[in-house]
Image (cartoon, coloured by chain):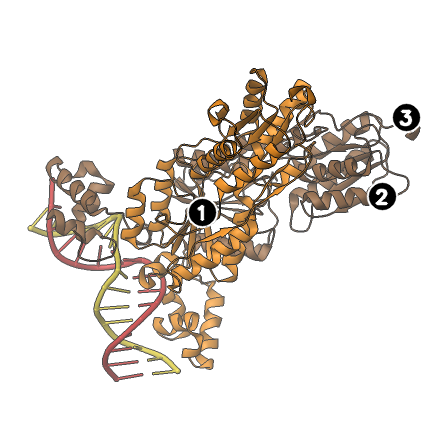
Chain colours: A brown, B orange, C yellow, D red
Amino acid sequence: MSDSRTAPTLNDVAREAGVSTATVSRCLNAPDKVVEKTRIRVLKAVDRLGYTPNFAAQVMAAKRSFTIGAIIPTMDNAIFARGLQAFQDELRDRGYTLLVSSSVYSPEIEQEQIRALVARGADGLLLIGHDRPKEVYDYLDQHQVPALVAWSHLPDALLPSVGFDNHGALRGITEKVIDMGHRNIAMISGVTKGNDRARDRVKGLRDALRENGLDPEQTTVIETSYDIEQGALAFRDLMASTPRPTAIICGNDVLAVGAIREAHKLGIAVPDEVSITGFDDMELANVVTPSVTTVHVPHREMGRKAARELTEMVAGTSKGRSTCLDTSVVMRESLGPPPSQAR
Amino acid sequence: MSDSRTAPTLNDVAREAGVSTATVSRCLNAPDKVVEKTRIRVLKAVDRLGYTPNFAAQVMAAKRSFTIGAIIPTMDNAIFARGLQAFQDELRDRGYTLLVSSSVYSPEIEQEQIRALVARGADGLLLIGHDRPKEVYDYLDQHQVPALVAWSHLPDALLPSVGFDNHGALRGITEKVIDMGHRNIAMISGVTKGNDRARDRVKGLRDALRENGLDPEQTTVIETSYDIEQGALAFRDLMASTPRPTAIICGNDVLAVGAIREAHKLGIAVPDEVSITGFDDMELANVVTPSVTTVHVPHREMGRKAARELTEMVAGTSKGRSTCLDTSVVMRESLGPPPSQAR
DNA sequence: TTGTAAGCGTTATCAT
DNA sequence: ATGATAACGCTTACAA
């Protein structure tokens, strides 16, 4: 039917239907502005040719893409999966398409991906956390691209955020650990450089210790990447130190699971000999043995709320409102009182 | 510096540097076609204005985007994460950007996402599995978009694929189970509709049973979505049936982990009372207790190979070669001999 | 080596 | 209600 092996354009459709390109465009974008008879004819032509609008051309002409970009630190584990899926679902409902890419926890790559997404006409951007070079913010400002931060909440940051209080959450779980009777506590944290969530969590630990008369300076904090293997390694180190901590607070469930696995391997009973806690309440946390006491984060709600807020920002209905969602500690098996000889 | 609150264009740069737009374009795309002195002047202007090329315009003019799209069934768990990360890494090395979206296991959404990605000028597409309406293939054909299938390998499919033999892999693990002495085997499978991987795995089970003198008709196969909770539910059903199976083969590690968790809850010992196997060798599988005997899939290798093949297809260097990667059974704790009274 | 200008496929503003 | 036609920002012959 078509003259050659190439995608049909508006022009082809117009010719096929015997109308102008303007009419075809209207049929597609404002059907009520064209009389039924012509419309049917045009739509038939569209069907016959299998026409799909060229997006690049649309973006150029309309300066609007109904596309939202999201850049997450990693796709390699499920930390961001649930929240992002909810984000996409809500966006779909609102007529937007989500494009995702990963920065592999590298600021340079994130910057590159931001440029890629913006250049691609993304109407808005979802970013994770607030930590990034100032020039990125300048860039967003110059290009007038609305951006929203998730997974972190800072009231007076450069960008609005739909997140939660990482500092408070970790302080909360630390308090539970202290209430259990633990006095010798260590932490396995994610890499804090360029990661405000990880940094706030460590701060939360320190503050909770201080407020309870414990010395933050005497507390070991091992920093490592979010990886089961790394969690295991860090745990092994911690168990070799004297005095051995009776509770290990992990900055993330993945690390906690790594620690639990290593404990199992070393024949150290959890929580009888050492307690372990996580953060995120990933599915993983409730599946390992013992199940992980952790901080529950309302990922789905965060994703949905972020989608709503960001689309409103894009539509110009909102200047960007920040939301702080509640987290809670989920008590499971991996946290118990310290062994009696340690008292 | 800039006249207004809008992104600078080629024209702005050209004016700023006192050259034509063609020269600016050349500086960016073919630097050696312009003399050093001009180039420096231009690049300075680019810098000063914070210029980023408008991608839509580039795509329209050059009909090339250096973008690859991937549509995966879900981001909600880690099944595709590892392979996809490797895919992206390799693409980056080759100068391509990856855009991912999820179809939520729905053919309609997949189709919509394909159109979105193609309309956005994706140079090539990565799809999961071969099962989809013919019109999708027609669409890809008409738009001349190279596409590659992963996670599945079918020699004579419409699209080339870099995957593995789902049928053979499940047959392989079933044989191990039979060799262990099991005669009463059941399966918890993923949804097979529109999913050739899941379907091939079920077929693999049936064939292995038949080849070993067992009756596939007498074997219960429960079909459910890839979800820990669903795996748990299915396991509970299976345990309530008579005669109770002594081994449960799961179509996926997520299901296996759900089953293990439920066994734990029901006080059924794994593998002493019932053996459980998985598929994929996700990180998860080696972290639960007992660890899951499963089919190892070379996800990273698959991702890298797929990226190489697809970029070659895009470049026109390859017409699309299919590769079948090897899988292997990883023996862990969840598979053991059947309880003696069941013999 | 550099500039000119014709597209690329839409949308949107005017006319008609 | 429909049709011309000028953008949109870039690439790329072709000219100079």
D4 sits to left or right of A304: left
Residue B159 location (% of width, % of height): 37, 50
Q: Looking at the picture, how far across and down is residue A168, in whole percent?
A: 69, 33
Residue B3 x/y as whole percent: 41, 61
The x and y percentages for residue A23 are 16, 46
For the residues marked 1 and 3, what is the alpha-carbon distance in whole angstroms?
57 Å
Give SS at disc 3: helix
Res. A9 in view:
yes
Label 1: how many residues lie within 10 Å, few (<14), some (14-19) or many (20+)?
many
Q: Is label 2 in a helix, a strand or a loop?
A: helix
Q: What residue sits right under mark 3 in the picture?
A: A340
Dot 2 and dot 3 residues touching (CB under 8 Å): no
The chain letter for the residue carrying disc 3 is: A
On the image, numbered disc 1 is attached to which residue?
Answer: B153
User: Quadrant of the rendered structure where residue A169 is?
Assistant: top right
> Which dot marks residue B174?
none
* Tags 2 and 1 both on a single chain: no
As shown in the figure, which amino acid type bears the numbered disc 2? Glu
- The answer to which of A77 and A162 lies nearer the viewer is A77
Residue designated by label 2: A217
Q: Which marked residue is nearer to the observer: mark 2 or mark 1?
A: 1
Q: Which of A223 and B134 is in front in this view?
A: B134
Looking at the image, is mark 2 or mark 3 earlier in the sequence?
Answer: 2
Quarter of the figure with residue A81? top right
Quarter of the image that includes the C terminus of chain B: top right
Task: State the residue at coordinates (19%, 41%).
Answer: A27
